[in-house]
Image (cartoon, helix red, strand yellow):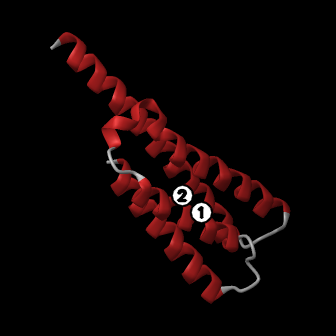
């Protein structure tokens, strides 16, 4: 689930940055979205065994999500295009949600094995 989520969100970030930069070259915040896309896709290929990572497997999407939140705030301050700012917020929240889902999934697995 972690690998697929990172790939899907990395692809969405890449799509946002490519289409966004094609539409509006003045949206400099999208270069940070490009870096987040590369990080997300790169992290997906680094993960070998999702279940062996324990609770730390939610760290990568959480850090990417927090980074995108920072880009959102800076985008608001720099008066970047509204569509780019709000789509960055949405994808950052999705990264944070992925992190929470991965961590919650680990806790559910631990409870099932402890009681089963």
Label 1's element? helix
Name the spot of residue 56 as percent of width and height, x first: 48, 35
Q: Residues within 10 Å of mark 1 (few under 14, many from 20)?
A: many
Tell me the mark number nearer the camera, choosing from 1 and 2.
1
Against 39, is 17 above or below? below
Q: Is residue 56 above or below residue 66?
A: above
Graded by Cα atoms within 10 Å as few (under 14), some (14 to 19) or many (20 or more), the crowding at tag 2 reads many
Q: Residue furthest top?
A: 115
Residue found 75% across the figure and 76% down from its top: 28
Residue 114: name its quadrant. Answer: top left
Left-right relation of 27 to 45: right
- Toward which corner of the image does residue 68 lie, by quadrant? bottom right
Number of marks in picture: 2
Q: Which residue in the protein does label 1 denote?
A: 36
Element marked by disc 2: helix
Q: Is residue 93 left or right of residue 76?
A: left
Q: Residue at x 58, y 53 (%)?
A: 92
x and y, in percent, of residue 85 in the image:
68, 64
* Residue that appears at 55% across and 73% down: 16
Tag 1–tag 2 contact (CB < 8 Å): yes
- Residue occupying the far right of the picture: 78
Residue 79 image offset from top left, x and y in percent: 82, 68
| Image quarter of residue 34 | bottom right
Instruction: Check disc 2 and report the residue beneath it.
Output: 91
Q: Earlier in the sequence, mark 1 or mark 2?
A: 1
Q: Is residue 73 left or right of residue 113?
A: right
């Amino acid at each position: 689930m972690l690998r697929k989520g990172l790939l899907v969100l990395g692809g969405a970030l890449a799509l946002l940055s490519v289409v966004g930069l094609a539409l509006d070259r003045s949206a400099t915040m999208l270069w940070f979205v490009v870096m987040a896309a590369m990080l997300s896709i790169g992290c997906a290929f680094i993960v070998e065994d999702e279940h062996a990572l324990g609770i730390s497997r939610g760290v990568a999407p959480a850090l990417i999500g927090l980074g995108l939140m920072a880009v959102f705030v800076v985008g608001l301050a720099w008066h970047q295009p509204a569509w780019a700012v709000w789509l960055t917020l949405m994808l950052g929240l999705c990264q944070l949600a992925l992190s929470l889902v991965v961590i919650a999934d680990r806790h559910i697995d631990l409870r099932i094995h402890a009681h089963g």
